Image (cartoon, rainbow, N blue to C red):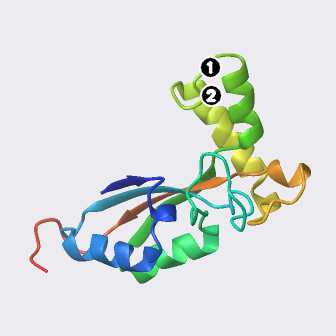
Amino acid sequence: ITCFGVLHHIPNVSAVLREFARVMMPGGVLLLREPTTTMGDWRRPRAGLTTRERGIPPALLTAQVQQAGFELQRVSDCYFPPWVRLCLAVGLAPFKHAATTRIDALLARATRSRHRYHRHSLASRFAPASRFVLAVRPGSPGAVA
């Protein structure tokens, strides 16, 4: 299952993750990427965002994946907003090229400790804004659940 930037639109993320695990064959792979910040003050209209759209705190996201029955294989923070904005300003697609993607990963890893769910200041935006998860449903491929 590949699920990039979908779960933060859904009110009951844990139920969807459990359903992913239920329908997936043992040994199946889950690729997941979700924003991990509030995405602004949801009490007021936000340009380009739905009413209830909000990120999922990183620790909660990985905990819910595990509670749904998946084994984490890799977890990494990504999407460093200043780098993405710089790429776009100079006409580069930030995730289309291996080099720009690696730089984003490096910046996100280097600033991971600065992550805040609520970003109230400009300085707090110098941290990763999303999390990537690679997880596997336990069991041998082809086994009957």
Pointers 1 and 2 in contact (CB under 8 A)? yes
Q: Image quadrant for the C terminus?
A: bottom left
Q: Is residue 131 above or below residue 18?
A: above
Q: Residue at x 44, y 77 (%)?
A: 12
Percent position of residue 86, x then y: 75, 27
Q: Which residue is mark 2?
A: 100
Q: Amino acid at mark 1?
A: Leu
In-front residue for pair 43/71: 43
Query: Farthest front residue?
Result: 45
Instruction: Kindly identify the amino acid type of the residue bearing the numbered disc 2.
Output: Thr
Q: On the image, numbered disc 1 is attached to which residue?
A: 92
Q: Position of residue 28 (x, y in %)?
A: 25, 63
For label 1, the crowd category at 10 Å Cα-Cα, with few meaning under 14, some 14 to 19 and many 20 or more, is some
Label 2: which secondary element: helix
Q: Is residue 68 above or below residue 135?
A: below
Query: Could you tell me which residue is drawn at 61 percent across and 64 percent down?
Result: 54
Can see residue 128?
yes
